[in-house]
Amino acid sequence: MGSGSKMLGFIGVLGIMASSLAFVLFSEKEVITVGFVPPIFAAAPERVELLALKQDETLGELLEGVLDANDQYDFVIALRERANPRRLRPGTEVAFRWSTTTTSELRAVDVTVGADLTVRMTPSAAGWMSTTMTTPVVTDTVWVSGEIQTNLWDAVTGSENREGLDPGNLAEFFSDLNDIFQWQVDFSRDIRLGDFFRFSYERAVRPDGTMRRGHVLSAELVNRGRSYEAVWFDPNGDGSGTYYDENGNSVRLRFLKSPIQYERISSGFSNSRFHPVLQTWRAHRGVDYAANRGTPVRATGNGVVIEREMQSTYGNTIVVRHSNGWTTRYAHMNGFAPGIRVGSAVDQSDLIGYVGMTGLATGPHLHYEMRQYGTFKDPETIQLPPGDPVPVDQWAAWETQSRMRLSLLDRLPLPWDTRLAMNDLGEGEASDAGER
Ligand SMILES: [Zn+2]
């Protein structure tokens, strides 16, 4: 997903282009998640005492003032069937529901264990009983389409807030589109008036009106008359999915073009250059990107951190090992991102550090190297290897899901001239958009 820093760069550039955008937004309620306890209008009156877990407080400690020691123990054991009491975060809400018809009888205790999940604990003769209650979240799919009439920046900030899609959300979605299509289209240079986009995404709406946005499920960008499509698919079903084109090829490359948003390349790849600090001729087998101190540095591909150390020449350095014999090096950094150590698994675009000028450097910049099986490659000219296509054993699931997700887009109109410019646009199958 888009990073804050990337977004800033993105908005900055878009601001230069000029806009107002025709915005169409549809929403359709799709699936209602169950677990909803119907209202009981004759419920006995109760008094609710709401406590929240403090920093470093255990659930047992929170229960201390309310339950006796044996009861606390039983409670924690019973809760463990539904949630790990040790994993409860500070701020977790625990609601004690007291009966007001009898003298302070505890009727139930609700422990909020997740965004939409509560465990209800009820005392009984046999001890504490636990049940889970899911907040009745409505998952729906939202479609957005628009044509770039003046500039994208106004599209982000000036569009009307409909269906809870505020400019902040929109900015995130444009950042998502940038992330999805960054290898096909350079959003800072290639976007033109008349370009058109449409995308669908999932969101979950809670009864109180708050919502969580999910993935962009499918997206299409028509840039200078050429259509680019991307469909979200998660081969392992563990949330680590990615985007593929309509033929099941990854729309992503194995590496980002660059690990940072840079201002300029201050020194390119060369087998011989005059070193500004060492005052000698030597090879420069990487690229120097000039950028402000503190600019976020991102892993260009999925891999494992194999070096993270301060070196005399390279300063604060990280080396990431990727599949197929690839390694990437990031040097002269000001510091490392929290949690990044030798052995850390990193995904493409994960923050690993910040631009600095540690080691031998005359100004803040990032020195970046790519090697395959030990051979240096020029990051500026190398043909970046493609990401993996949809795995063969997932092909059946892919075909079903991609057809469904692409058909979501066909619910949105295309501008007439765009329609004429595209020759391969089939009539969308009218299928139910039901996901899940
Ligand atoms: Zn360098």
Image (cartoon, rainbow, N blue to C red):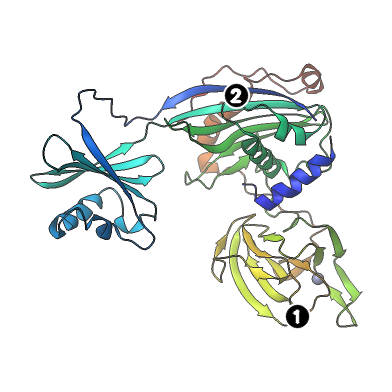
Q: Residue 57 location, x and y as percent?
A: 33, 61
Check the picture and name the quadrant holding the C terminus: top left
Picture residue at 75% right of the left edge, 78% below the top:
359
Looking at this view, is 31 or 5 the one in front?
5
Q: Secondary structure at mark 1?
A: loop
Where does the image place residue 132, in percent across and percent down from the top left?
28, 40
Mark 2 or mark 1: name the one nearer the start of the chain.
Answer: 1
Q: Residue at x 51, y 42 (%)?
A: 393
Q: Does any atom of ligand 1 lie closer than 8 Å to the CB of label 2?
A: no
Q: Is 423 rendered above or below residue 388?
A: above
Mark 1 CB within 8 Å of ligand 1: no
Q: Quadrant of ligand 1?
A: bottom right
Viewer-nearest of discs 2 and 1: 1
Determine the image quadrant of residue 420.
top right
Q: Is residue 54 left or right of residue 422?
A: left
In the picture of the structure, the residue carrying the numbered disc 2 is: 407
Q: Residue at x 85, y 75 (%)?
A: 283
Q: Who's the residue at 81% across and 66% down the image?
A: 288
Q: Name the side, left or right, on which 121 lies relative to 224.
A: left
